[in-house]
Image (cartoon, rainbow, N blue to C red):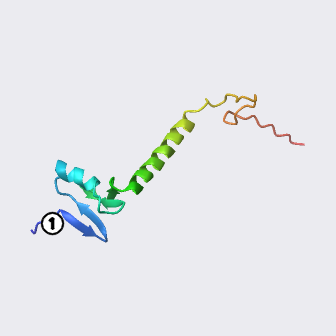
Amino acid sequence: MADKPSSGEILGIPYNFERPSLGRLLSSYWQPGKGMLVEKPFGTRYTPNLANWRSWLVLAVAGGLYYQQQQSAGGAPSGGSDEDGVEDGDGPVEVIVDDD
């Protein structure tokens, strides 16, 4: 049986299943002459090129959105009231139906 290649492309998607070395890992994330995305050192698809300022911008926006989500998820406990004395709508609601 023929040996299967450990790196290449399938339908335009790169793959690389060679055992990664430390030098290859470091050099794959920092490629100054390349675009925003570069091939992963191990696995399939692409990874951000940390030598490109656009990658840092995308990572900063993603980090900011994650931080904002964590802050909103850890807000006031449900069923409490806010500063105006109006209760949150997260608690149980009593519904009365009048059949006339």
Residue 49 shown left or right of residue 84 in the figure: left
> For numbered disc 1, what is the local secondary structure?
loop
Q: x%, y% of residue 29? A: 28, 53
Nearer-the-camera pick, 92 or 68? 68
Nearer-the-camera pick, 49 or 2? 49
**Residue drawn at the location 26% of the way across and 68% of the way down:** 9
Q: Is residue 81 above or below residue 68?
A: above
Residue 88 shown left or right of residue 33 in the figure: right
- Residue extending furthest toward the left: 1
Residue 45 visible within the image: no
**Residue drawn at the location 48% of the way across and 49% of the way down:** 61
Instruction: Give, as a three-letter code, the residue at label 1.
Output: Lys
Res. 15 image quadrant? bottom left
- Residue extending furthest toward the bottom: 11
Q: Which residue is mark 1?
A: 4
Q: Is residue 83 above or below residue 46?
A: above
Q: Is residue 78 above or below residue 6?
A: above
Question: Tag 1: Cα neighbours inside 10 Å, few (<14), some, or many (≥20)?
Answer: few
Nearer-the-camera pick, 4 or 81? 81
Residue 98 shown left or right of residue 61 in the figure: right
Q: Is residue 48 above or below residue 74?
A: below
**Residue drawn at the location 31% of the way across and 63% of the way down:** 34
Q: x%, y% of residue 38? A: 31, 60
Q: The N terminus appears in which quarter of the rendering?
A: bottom left
**Residue drawn at the location 63% of the way across and 31% of the way down:** 78
